[in-house]
Image (cartoon, rainbow, N blue to C red):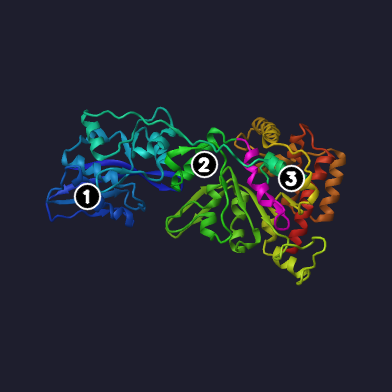
Amino acid sequence: MVARVSTVAFQGIEGVPVEVQVMISPGKLLMPIVGLPDKAVAESRERVQAALHASGLSLPPKKVTVNLAPADIPKEGSHFDLAIALGLMAALGAIPGDALADYVVIGELNLDGTLAPVAGALPAAISANALGKGLICPYDSGPEAAWAGPDIDILAPRSLIGLANHFRGTQVMSRPEPAIRALPANLPDLIDIKGQESAKRALEVAAAGGHNLLMVGPPGSGKSMLAARLPSILPPLSALELLEVSMIHSIAGQLSGGKLSDRRPFRTPHHSATMAALVGGGLRAKPGEASLAHHGILFLDEFPEFSPQVLDALRQPLETGECVIARANHRVTYPASIQLVAAMNPCRCGMAGQPGHTCARGPKCVSDYQGRISGPLMDRIDIRIDVPAVSAADLIRPRPAEASAVVARRVAAARERQRERFQEAGVPQVLTNARCSTALIEKIAEPDAAGLQLLRDAAEKLKFSARGYHRVLKVARTLADLDGSDTVGRIHLAEAISYRMAGERLSAAA
């Protein structure tokens, strides 16, 4: 007799159905696991045997064969432990085999028979729901899995004994409830920033349209402070965005206690990050910082200090909104619709262009340092601003500053205008101007006669690329949305071009 238990293997953020087949047959006492298992799956043999022994069950002195079908898909991770253990228990008659037919099973076993939380509970629950089945997962993963929907049957036992008692009818487990992560009460606020009015304006424009932003200025001018306050003016995640973000974080094992939050991700990798850390990869092709920042912000401080090869790896995600990791035996795609925010000094010494400062290396210090950023990557950054040092007058007698809540309301109103516009255009999946197609932006951001002449003159003088031309239109459309205007005027194009002019100067250095 062969006992069968359903589980999943993860490819990207998708759960691929896998069937665990367990057969007890006469022969030497062995327990081979076949079906392309990795080291963690192969070691489950020892964990399963110890957990069953601790739960009062012992394996018979026979050969136990465990097959993970289909056998040509690599199986990775410790979440196969519980499915293997339940297959053995069904083969031994400890639990009714037909009771497991309606469930997908994931979970890691401790040696004492208790269950440890595993990564991927939410994608597993969604995959189980698509198959018309329920989910059995560890107790600590239950609040995460419950977000897959109110109709899916979820069992979240603390131990093997608790699950066996549930199937015998001697113990009833309640369905876990979705958990919400409490938001921090003291988020950084824009009201803390003294001076830097033009930088705050650029931050608002970037937030309203989802545009990539680069801030260049001397040390201590407030670039990192400005970037840290960007999440406080962004709207919360929609229900669909929340699900996508949570699935990525679940696969990466970064959902603390299975609790979800509607706050947009804000990832700040160190400049020593490798290419695999930033765009994904490694032995199991896990999501990188770009994917973990999906529908949020990827903040790269000390921008030129990153390896040029690592930075150029971001060119595809910035354009397509996804990271594709190709290996010899498989190919994985992770979503990466990110808003890139970067900060850098104007040169290695950091003081180029400051009054009274003369760099010992001369102009070469600036060109060498800024040249570490390639022209094609710079072309993908919509807004580039200079952030000068704060003057003593700004610190001693600062002008009244707006709170983040006030700016957030304007950003939310601009984003709502964009959502309604794209809904009417038949592309509801597009939510911001930055993600709009070139054909559509030419239609919805068509400037008036004065604006068209200004744009034509600027394009010829500054030698805009085709991408640069369309990105100027996108920023201008966002500026018009902030003003509540249906048409893109000359004033909107002038401001959008001013943001692009500084970027063209930096591209020339590259």
Residue type pointed to by label 2: Val
Q: How crowded is mark 1: few (under 14 residues within 10 Å), some or many (20 or more)?
A: some
Q: In this view, does 500 lie to the left or right of 302?
A: right
Q: Residues within 10 Å of mark 2 (few under 14, many from 20)?
A: many
Q: Can you give x and y, in whole percent of width and height, for residue 69 in the image?
A: 30, 48
Q: Is residue 399 left or right of residue 317?
A: right
Q: How crowded is mark 3: few (under 14 residues within 10 Å), some or many (20 or more)?
A: some
- Dot 3 or dot 1, earlier in sequence: 1
Q: Which of 163 and 196 is in front in this view?
A: 196
Q: What element carries label 1?
A: helix
Q: Is residue 230 left or right of residue 245?
A: right
Q: Which of 318 and 328 is in front in this view?
A: 318
Residue type pointed to by label 3: Lys
Residue type pointed to by label 1: Ala
- Asked if the residue at tag 1 contacts the one at tag 2, i.e. Cβ–Cβ closer than 8 Å, the answer is no
Check if residue 448 falls in the magenta segment: no
**Which residue is labeled 2 in the image?**
245
Residue 469 can be seen, yes or no: yes
Q: Which of 397 and 449 is in front in this view?
A: 397
**Which residue is labeled 3 in the image?**
194
Q: In this view, does 106 lie to the left or right of 147?
A: left
Against 366, residue 160 (above or below) is: above
- Dot 2 or dot 1, earlier in sequence: 1
Which label lies toward us, 2 or 1?
1
The residue lying at 33 percent from left, 38 percent from top is 104
**Which residue is labeled 1 in the image?**
50
Give the position of the N terminus as an image quadrant: top left
What's the magenta region? Answer: 212-235
Q: How far apart are marks 2 and 3 (CA)?
A: 33 Å
